[in-house]
Amino acid sequence: MAATPWVLLLFALAWRSEAVFTSPHQIKLQNNEYSDVLVAIHRDIPEDLRIVDRLKEILTKASEDLYIATNSRAFLKEVKILIPKTWSKKPEYQPAGTETFERANVRVDVPNALYGDNPYVQQKGGCGEAGDYMHLTPKYVLDKQYGEAYWGPNGKTFVHEWAHLRWGLFDEYGQDDPAGQSYPHFYSGSLGGVQPTRCSAWVAGTNKHMVTGAPCQLDPVTGVYGPECRFYPDEQTNRATGSYMFMHFLNQVTSFCHSDPSGDPLSYHNREAPNKHNSLCGGQSAWGVMDRHPDFANGANPPREVQSTVPDFVLLQENDYRIVLVLDASNSMRGEPLRRLGQVATRFIRSTVGFGASVGLVKFARHASIDHPVISVDSQADRDALIATIPTTTVLYTCIGCGLLKGVEALEAVGPPEGGVLLLVTDGRETTAPRIRDVIPELLRKRVIVATVAYSQNADATLESLAQQTGGPSFYAARRDSAALDNAFTATFEATAGGKGVKLLNEERTIAGGQTYTNHVHVDSSVGQNTTFSFYWLGGSRPTVTMETPVGHVITEGSPMYDVTSDTITVEIPGMAPPGKWAYNISNPGPDDHDVITIITSYPPTDGEPIRVKAQVSAVSLNYSSSQPTALRIFASVRRGYLPVTGAVVKVHIAKPPDGRVEELLLLDNGAGADVTKNDGIYSRYFLGFSADGRYGVSVTVDNSQGDAAGYTVIQRRAGSGAMPMDPDAGGSSVQQEPLQQFQRMTTGGVFEVQGVPSGGVPTVDVLPPSRVTDLAVVDVSHADATVTLRWTASGDDFDQGGPANFVELRYGRHFDQLADDFLGSPLVDQSQVLQGNLTSPPPPGHVQTVNIRVPERGHNVTFAFSLRMCDDQDNCSPPSNIVTSNLEHIAQPIKANNTVTWVIIGCVVGVAVLAAILILLYFTVCRAKKQIKPADSIHPAPTNGNTSYARTV
Ligand SMILES: *[C@@H]1O[C@H](CO)[C@@H](O)[C@H](O)[C@H]1NC(C)=O
Ligand SMILES: *[C@@H]1O[C@H](CO)[C@@H](O)[C@H](O)[C@H]1NC(C)=O
Ligand SMILES: *[C@@H]1O[C@H](CO)[C@@H](O)[C@H](O)[C@H]1NC(C)=O
Ligand SMILES: *[C@@H]1O[C@H](CO)[C@@H](O)[C@H](O)[C@H]1NC(C)=O
Ligand SMILES: *[C@@H]1O[C@H](CO)[C@@H](O)[C@H](O)[C@H]1NC(C)=O
């Protein structure tokens, strides 16, 4: 099979925006039955009911295969298929409630250019953690023959992906990822000789050169087979039954690898294989991880005979978008908090909500009232009418339950409430019944989504749990933080409505009397449509704004696009704003200090996708004292459509209790520490700086506007957790780097709540170890020098941060098992063995460290295994890293096929020089004849550029 031309299609593909990270739909497993599995079709996929029929077929088969693969412990019992609202309505479709495309477990959407039609799962968490979603393309779903020809039976492919999605397993095959982290296809095994990376070790097949089909040759640099060698399974002789995470498509493969010595040896786990699964799961088998998952832990869901594994399918259809603002107007909101809320709500109604969305407004204090019914916003007058009802006065007492019930009532006035969104903003605690907990059953019954904004540390503690239970996002904004409040409103819209707007900048500045504040923003060409600059102030005299466009035009008071109201200046750039630097000055003419809030938003061109940032925290509530050490992970994805943007400067700002002090952290996409996959456009970091109990507000900025733009790239590649194509040579992957313009983005990462932090803050003694290294790799081996070069990404003093760790404890063994089973008892590499590099002065976290070390032995069958841990100055050490092996035998320089060609060419050139004109004719004859027997170019198209490599995985 030839390399598929996905890469060439890149810019012809429809772009697709990924919504903000939202908590995925909760799948349940009870009594061996998975229910509430949500499969959704994107609204831009043209109506084709065969997609629904084929989904039913695929999932029915998958359920049967899953039942077998889990030893009769689980199958799909209930699957909901969400039909987009763009498809025609049918009586058998039920209205969707909290089921949205953004929360779907399985999405059917245009291809991710990195994967083409190859099914894959986005996994940003570590071993054992659920993935975000499984992605199938319409072509994969519709064209059974095509899908099965490439990736094997639909049902089994789905089960492979399910294992990524549900149990957090990783692939057990080698993979090439020129932009990220590669995993070798071969390794030097303790059974002797070079082994293919596989699970189980009993999968039968042969190792062959991908292009020529010749036997593989050892590469003296790596000690294993060269880069174009692959393992080709042999269906005829294979008896191995595992594993689904390796070659799920083999007939005999019906199970996951396990590590039970008394189990089936043909699916026994191969912990030596240097694949992603072993690296991230510390050598545990697939079942080893599954047995710890709540689905199966402690014998949960024991094997059960069932009559049928055929799932029930429920067809749901998306509703039109409806949102009700449920705003607190109790006394605690009086004055500035209410004014700030009013400004943010006004901007939301005026610029965030697109025409056609339905909006209503409820306020609550002691009682609640529908101050504006839900209407479809179709005109400026509709917006003005809504804005006029934003509360400006306050009353005693707080009845949040009243507000929520009124919100449901407002939705019910215009139709079934299912899927409607209530955006609840409150700063206080409930004083009056019904309380939140009293109305939750009603909210769940009516299947509305509640997004919550805690507008002060003191806001009711149940807000986050309310949002979680109803599938909504939750946010925190300190009382004087309009930027956070505005982010919460826009992120809610993005998460629930799939809004297209992008926030470039959002900040609040205090400008002293008579002073001018100068700043700028970079507008990139992935946005530019309807670019709006908004400036708000809170009382006092009106500031003036002067702007200069990238082409040198000045916009200021009096310009046609400069609009002033009582507390806002809005500058709307008509059409497409030219990309580049937009400078602005805000002057405060009055005598007193002024707080001015600047918000800059823009939309992508009609047929384009913007670069978008979305952020999320790994947990919404944490108990500091329940587990040591406590760490939270913060993720931000920076992507254009599905394509990762790499090399961006992504910072997270965490507003911490008790005083709102902001801690700033740089997020990294380096495949180390909290980051699972390098260069996938998901930037991650641990957060360790707990200061007190309370709410921590998270916002994220991406700012590549400083300095040199050369390093900012979009990389198109294929790798990660996709299903393995059956043909090892199927699908070349290509890395292309598209330089990006300078760009800026801002978003919120929501809120997390922490309890149990010792009063007076966390102890200052260093108890946190560096994080585990998962990317240890052998770079080269030298038989001649008896040396091995190793490389890894350093962790820090505390997890992946702080200063550098204190030292690296690198250990080795002649046998894999020796090192794996007794790390601390294995010989230590000491500095005298180190020829290059330094084990006692590791670089700062996130930096790559390389050492070249001398080994005590070399020769035939001499293999060394290596593993390391990093330790800090308090001797807190990480768990041992992944284990790598190296082959120290003598390897002759291989005779390369193209060497012959080289010699012929040289021969030809010499011949021409010596024999001149006489041999010209012969020269052409020989050289042309040689060219024609070059390896089958026509079967395997040549790489399109120097960076191309062959990825068998996706
Ligand atoms: C090398 O390993 C192979 C396979 O295990 C074995 O047959 C052979 O005897 C070994 N050779 C030496 C010199 O140990
Ligand atoms: C951009 O503004 C125009 C004019 O106000 C409006 O008609 C259009 O819908 C806006 N586009 C977006 C994407 O908001
Ligand atoms: C902003 O103010 C600075 C200093 O007064 C001035 O040099 C600059 O031209 C001004 N920029 C704009 C866009 O008005
Ligand atoms: C936190 O964990 C500790 C220790 O397990 C427990 O005593 C405490 O009750 C927990 N606190 C909360 C709020 O759950
Ligand atoms: C390694 O680094 C440590 C600390 O910087 C230094 O004292 C030591 O001399 C270095 N060792 C070598 C061999 O360079």
Image: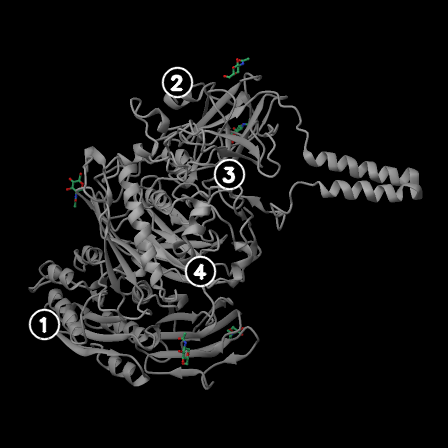
**Mark 2 crowdedness (10 Å alpha carbons): few <14, some 14-19, many ≥20:** few
Disc 3 marks a residue whose amino acid type is Val
Q: Are marks 1 and 2 in contact (CB under 8 Å)?
A: no
Q: Earlier in the sequence, mark 1 or mark 2?
A: 1
Disc 1 marks a residue whose amino acid type is His
- Counting from the top left corner in percent of width and height, residue 658 is at 25, 53
Separation of marks 3 and 4 at Cα, in angstroms: 30 Å
Residue 707 visible in rendering = no
Mark 1 = which residue? 367
Residue 899 visible in rendering = yes
Q: Nearer the viewer, mark 3 or mark 4?
A: 4
In this picture, residue 864 sits left or right of residue 252:
right
Point 28% across, 36% down: residue: 290
Depth check: 604 or 597 in front? 604
Mark 4 = which residue? 641
Asked if disc 1 is less than 8 Å from ligand 4, the answer is no
Point 15% across, 67% down: residue: 404
Q: Residue 433 shows which numbered tag?
A: none
Q: Earlier in the sequence, mark 3 or mark 2?
A: 2
**Does 261 appear above or below 288?**
above
Mark 3 = which residue? 848
The residue tagged with tag 3: helix, strand or loop?
Answer: strand
Disc 4 marks a residue whose amino acid type is Gly
State the residue lying farthest toward the front. 236
Name the quadrant containing residue 741: bottom right
